[in-house]
Image (cartoon, rainbow, N blue to C red):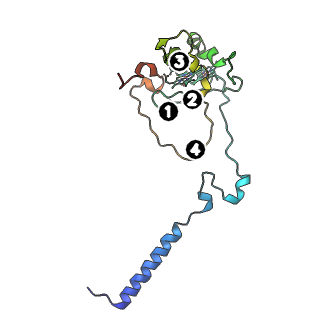
Amino acid sequence: MMFSKKTLIAAATLTAIIATGCAMSSNISEESLGLRKTDLYTENTTTGDKTSYSTVAAGESKVYERAFENAPPMISHEVEDMLPITIDNNSCLGCHDPLVAASVNATPVPKSHLFDMRKDKVLATVSNARYNCTQCHAPQSDNEPLVENTFKPEFRTQNGMKHSNLLDNLNEGVQ
Ligand code: HEC
Ligand code: HEC
């Protein structure tokens, strides 16, 4: 097929316009580079959102949904006066010890916390490996997420949404 010279020039010009247009729309603004949404020149005055943990007292808070089956639950209540956990003072256990928990309406520590994984032995008290509760359990700060989390957990049982049972199925798929 033959094209006239005019048609070819028109087509070339059109291609050039489209190409420039694409190049222009792919310009990236400085404000869009990071999660802070400010440019580099205001770096020094850019501050993050304030951390804002729950101030609701233990016993009056509403527990969070579990993130996934056997995830360590987030702490739903204020922990201000309970930290740091020291060798002589672990106030968490004052309420979450299975001997006390029911009387204060707290979730008792699960079986996995009363078990020595190295010696395969049930313990009468919380394992030393589980003593430092906030190593794994954290409070939630009330902030708008910068990136939406689209993860959706799948719980195999209804109970798994509210309670953990790691020790019962720790060896699943292994033995
Ligand atoms: C005065 C008693 C008390 C103390 C001390 C306490 N808790 Fe709690 N905790 C509760 C109660 C009661 C709940 C249930 C929610 C509520 O009623 O506020 C709870 C809920 C939780 C939950 C959520 C449980 C679930 O089923 O989702 C976690 C995790 C937790 N506490 C961890 C801790 C940690 C870690 C500490 C120490 C820093 C601690 N708690 C200290 C009473 C206490
Ligand atoms: C090494 C990490 C780790 C430490 C330390 C730890 N936990 Fe946990 N905790 C977990 C995980 C993981 C789960 C959920 C799976 C399981 O073990 O059943 C859990 C579950 C729990 C639950 C939910 C129980 C249920 O029936 O659903 C409570 C309450 C809890 N922990 C309290 C505590 C307290 C109080 C301490 C400190 C004495 C503590 N944990 C220390 C990792 C930890």
Dot 4 falls on a residue whose secondary structure is loop
Q: At 55% across and 12% down in the image, what residue appears?
A: 98
Residue 74 lies, in percent from the top left, at: 57, 29
Single out the residue that lies furthest toward the bottom. Answer: 5
Residue 51: image quadrant is top right
The answer for how far apart the CA atoms under marks 1 and 2 are is 9 Å
Residue 67 shows which numbered tag?
1
* Mark 2, other Cα within 10 Å: few <14 / some 14–19 / many ≥20: some
Residue type at mark 3 is His
Quarter of the rendered image showing ligand 1: top right
Q: Nearer the viewer, mark 1 or mark 3?
A: 3
Q: Is mark 2 within 8 Å of ligand 1?
A: yes
Q: Which mark is residue 41?
A: none
Quick check: marks 1 and 2 in contact, CB under 8 Å?
yes
Q: Taking 39 as reference, is 78 above or below it?
A: above
- Above or below, comparing residue 163 to residue 18 in the picture: above
* Mark 1 touches mark 4? (CB < 8 Å): no
Q: CA distance from mark 4 to mark 2?
A: 17 Å
